Image: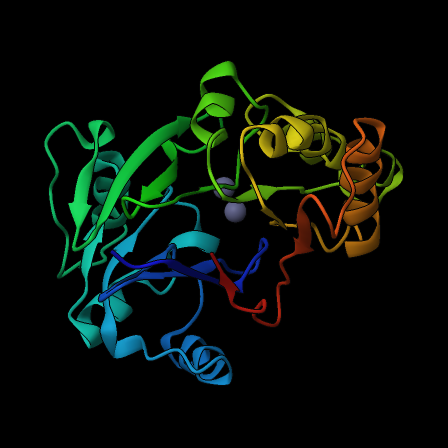
Amino acid sequence: MGSFEICTLASGSKGNCTYIKSGDTSLIIDQGLTVRELGIRAATRGIDLSTVGAVLVTHEHTDHVKGVAQFSKEYGAKVYMPLTCFETLRSRGETITGYEYVDGFETGFDVGDIHVEPFRLPHDARYTVGYRLTDGKNDVAVATDLGFVSDNTLARLCGCKAVIVESNHDKLMLEKGRYPYPLKVRIASKNGHLSNADSAAIASQLVASGAERILLAHLSEDNNTPELAFEATKEELEKHGIKEGEDVVLDVAYQYRPSEIIRL
Ligand SMILES: [Zn+2]
Ligand SMILES: [Zn+2]
């Protein structure tokens, strides 16, 4: 039985990729970078991409899939994704060499030593999922690109030792910002992206259910700052008597550089 190592290699609307390892199994969730850029970033954290056996894809938006086909071809990794996502990529003319069809995708499957359970998220793609992974010792979950936290989503995130959750925008910055009105409406909708307040609102429940690490992800470059995202959740935790740095470690994932490696 291993223990998890987690690193976001990129996070945000210009590309997403999270590396997760336990024991002899390593995988990535989404691959929205060029393979060359991914390689450069992985190397800075001592991550050997040749050991990555699988890519788990959340949905078909470009920032999550741009480099999936190339990565699976070059590294021989298997690719798991909702069938609708596979169909969309195929209709764009992409060949996903390592695609693994999973019957009853949402009920879960194993990737080496890691058990994977996808769960549906409300977002404006054809079908979007988050992932909860367990290595038999700990659970970790990744939920980015969601418009709101449903009861089901919260249940899937609770009980995880590490949670990567979207903290996309500051509501005021989005409202006052330069985005055209329809885009503002889209982002703030129930099928858009989580605001800082939305993710802050669930943080205390995550900690109460066992989260020791929370990584705020998919921050908007236009409508957020790392400080605003961090402070929103930190302050909300304090209202519940939870101290950041003692009861839980809170971090922010970046667009242009990898996070530290989180070890559970
Ligand atoms: Zn995205
Ligand atoms: Zn998306």
Q: Nearer the viewer, residue 102 or 45?
A: 45
Q: Quadrant of the N terminus?
A: bottom left
Q: Is residue 21 left or right of residue 159?
A: left
Q: Nearer the viewer, residue 72 or 111?
A: 111
**Image location of residue 150, percent across then percent down:** 53, 18
Question: Given the current orientation, which residue lies at the most extreme top position?
Answer: 151
Q: Is residue 236 visible?
A: yes
* Residue at 62% across, 70% down: 256
**Image location of residue 228, percent across then percent down:** 83, 47
Q: Is residue 222 left or right of residue 77?
A: right
**Image location of residue 124, percent across then percent down:** 48, 30
* Residue at 22% across, 55% down: 93
Q: Is residue 90 left or right of residue 57?
A: left
* Residue at 27% across, 70% down: 70
Q: Quadrant of residue 118?
A: top left
- Does residue 110 sit above or below 29 in this rendering? above
**Image location of residue 245, percent across then percent down:** 74, 52
- Does residue 262 sit above or below 228 in this rendering? below
Q: Nearer the viewer, residue 62 or 19?
A: 19
Give the tally of numbered discs. Answer: 0
